[in-house]
Amino acid sequence: MSTPVPKTPGWLDWHPDPSTPAFRLPPGAVDTHCHVFGPQRAFPFAPERKYTPCDGGKDQLFALRDHLGIARNVIVQATCHGADNSAMVDAVRASGGRARGIATVRPDVTEGELKRLDAAGVRGVRFNFVRRLVDASPHDDLSAIAKKIAPLGWHVVLYFESADLPELADFFASLPTPLVVDHMGRPDVTRPADGPEFSRFLRFVDAGDVWVKVSCPERLSVTGPAARDGERHPYTDVVPFARRVVEEFGDRVLWGTDWPHPNLTDHMPDDGLLVDHIPQVAVSADLRRRLLVDNPTRLYWPGEAA
C-alpha cells in the first residue's frame, strides 16, 4: 500500500451524481474510451507523471457503466500510471469479460508480457503525441512496439493535436497495425468543419485502416454550452465535426465517455448529458447502432460480431 499524494492544484473531480440519460442506449453499447485512476493506495501513480488526479477506480467506473446503460468498456491506460498497466489490467479482469484494455508499453516489452496482457483482455497500445502530457514520442521506439504487437492482432491508439498531423501522418501510415484516433484528432472547432484543416484529417482517415473516436466534446469545445445543469444541446460548436465523421465513416467510428475526464480545467461534465449528446452527432438509429454497438464489437469482441 502506498501513501496517497495530493492532487494537482485545481484538479476537477469526476461528477458525483450524473443524471439519468433521456437517450436510451441500444443493447450492447460500448464506451470505448475511459480510464481508471488508482485507487492510489493499491495502484500508485507513476513518478514521472505530469499530473496527479483524484482516485477513480474500477468500482466507480462500473457503477457509472450500469447507471448510464452501457454494456461494456474499453479501458485506456492513463498517462498518470505510465507504463505500469496494473490498475487497468485489474479493472479489465474484474469486469467478467465486459471490458477490454489499451496498454502503454516500452520498446523492450517482452513477448511473454504481451501475451500476458493479451490473455488479460488487452487489445492495443496507445501512442501519445500531446506534448503537455509526455516528454517525447520517439518514432523508432514506437515503430518497434508496433512491430511487436502486430502478430497479436492488436491496434495502435493515437492521441495527437490536429496541428501536428502533417508532420506525423507519414509515420502513422508506416505502422503495421490498424489505427484508432482519439477525440477526432483534436480539431480546432473555431475553424469550419468543411475547411481544409479538418478535410485533411478526413483524407488521412480515408487513406488507411483508421478508426475514429467521436469523443470528448467537452475537451474540444470553445463556445459550449457545457453539458451540465440539464443543458440539452451542449457543445454545439463540436457537433458539425462529429456529424461529418459519423456520416463519412459510419463503419469506423467509436464513442467514449473519457471518464474520469482527466485534466479538464473549465468544468466537469454530467456524464448523463454526454450520453444525451449522442443523438446530436449520430442522427439516425442506424448510425447510432453502428457507432455504439456494431463497430466496437467488431473491433474489440470480433468473435461476437454478426
Image (spheres, rainbow, N blue to C red):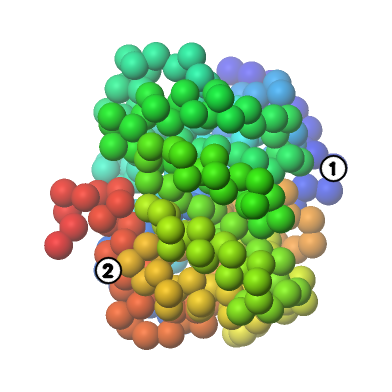
* Residue 289, horizontal then vertical, whole percent: 31, 73
Q: Is the residue marked by circle 2 packed among few (<14), some (14-19), or many (20+) residues within 10 Å?
A: few
Q: In the drawing, does residue 95 fall left or right of residue 126?
A: left
Q: Are marks 1 and 2 in contact (CB under 8 Å)?
A: no
Residue 139 in the image: above or below residue 184 = above
**SS class, disc 1:** loop
The image shows residue 173 at horizontal and vertical percentages of: 47, 45
**Could you say which is closer to the camera, residue 106 or residue 26?**
106
Question: In the depicted view, which residue is nearer to us: 22 or 245?
Answer: 245
Q: Residue 193 vs residue 26: left or right? A: right
Query: Left or right: where does residue 57 sit relative to residue 99?
Result: right
Q: Which residue is mark 2?
A: 27
Look at label 2 and name its amino acid.
Answer: Pro
The residue most toward the right is: 9
Residue sitting at 71 percent across and 55 percent down? Answer: 163
Residue 18 at least partly seen: no
| Identity of the residue drawn at 51% across and 82% down | 280
Residue matched to label 1: 9
Q: Mark 2 falls on what kind of element?
A: loop
What is the quadrant of the C terminus in the image? bottom left
Amino acid type at circle 1 is Pro
Q: Quadrant of residue 32?
A: bottom left
Mark 1 and mark 2: span between their CA atoms? 40 Å
Residue 138 disc label: none
Name the residue nearer the viewer: 302 or 72: 302
Residue drawn at point x = 69 percent, y = 50 percent: 164
Say whether residue 6 is visible: yes
Vertical relation: 238 (above or below) 206: below
Q: Quadrant of residue 43?
A: top right
Q: Quadrant of the N terminus?
A: top right
First reached walking from the N terminus: tag 1 or tag 2: 1
